[in-house]
Image: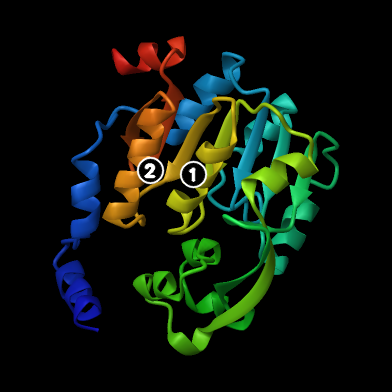
Amino acid sequence: MVHKILKKIFGAFGYKLVDKNLLKSQRLISSKSHLTVKLLIDNLVKKGKVKSLLQIGANDGLRFDVLNKYIKEYKINSLLVEPVPFYFSKLEDNYSKDNFVKLEKSAISKKSGTIDMYTVKKNYLDKYDEHIKGINSVNKKHLYKHNVKSNHIEKISVECLSPKDLLKKYEINSLDLVFIDAEGYDGDIVISFLDYIDFQPIIIFEFIHIEYDKFLNVIKRLDEKKYNYFSIDENLICFPKDDIFYESIHLK
């Protein structure tokens, strides 16, 4: 409660409170202030680096989505994963004519089964900014961080697949890009993928909501799997160490 009050007070004067956990994580990585994720994706796709991709946390496929345009325009073989039924139905509508896109209504977790998720009740969505529609998390506290009221939150049980079972289900043995936005659960998903896959896709995921100790584990696994990485805003961009494209970005 105190943190929320302080955010409002500082915000009124044009200041922003920065999470101490985020500051510690940012010290571990270099950043590319001249880049945006959209510009990076644009370069990757136009240079033929992305012929197949996996998007985890696809939401409705449109809202704040940097992949939609390129998936459709370049007909990228894509598997889009979204667990919340309300948003998955919209995702189906948005890609209904694209036979090169597969959709999976599941969450991704260490083990397959079911998992509880928290989302804003549909009848309260219009009380919040547009970005709240993408705040669906396995951690209820994550919604509180975005000032969602407790009585506006509903718990839903959704199917979940492990990375191993997801890739087996769709017979995937190679990917060019894995794009993750799992609202605080990104670290667990990245580690689970790295523990299973024997190929090296480019990986992009939101790191700002990952607890510092978990983030240290993510960095350790990326190092072990021979990845280079840097941040763009709130995302960590991970390239295989032998990727020439990384060097061209890194030297700029």
Per the image, the residue denoted by label 1 is 190
Q: Is residue 206 above or below residue 106?
A: above
Q: Position of residue 133 (x, y in %)?
A: 55, 65
Q: Residue at x 50, y 65 (%)?
A: 135
Count of residue discs: 2
Q: Quadrant of residue 98?
A: top right
Residues at marks 2 and 1, CA–CA distance in whole angstroms = 7 Å
Q: Position of residue 91 (x, y in %)?
A: 72, 54
Q: Secondary structure at mark 2?
A: helix
Crowding at dot 2, Cα within 10 Å, few <14 / some 14-19 / many 20+, comes out as: many
Q: Quadrant of residue 238?
A: top left
Instruction: Indicate the quadrant containing the C terminus: top left, top right, bottom left or bottom right.
Output: top left
Crowding at dot 1, Cα within 10 Å, few <14 / some 14-19 / many 20+, comes out as: many
Q: Residue at x 27, y 32 (%)?
A: 31
Given residues 34 and 245, the one toward you in this image is 245
Per the image, the residue denoted by label 2 is 218
Q: Is residue 49 above or below residue 151?
A: above
Q: Position of residue 185 (x, y in %)?
A: 47, 57
Marks 2/1 in contact by CB < 8 Å: the verdict is: yes
The amino acid at mark 1 is Val
The amino acid at mark 2 is Val
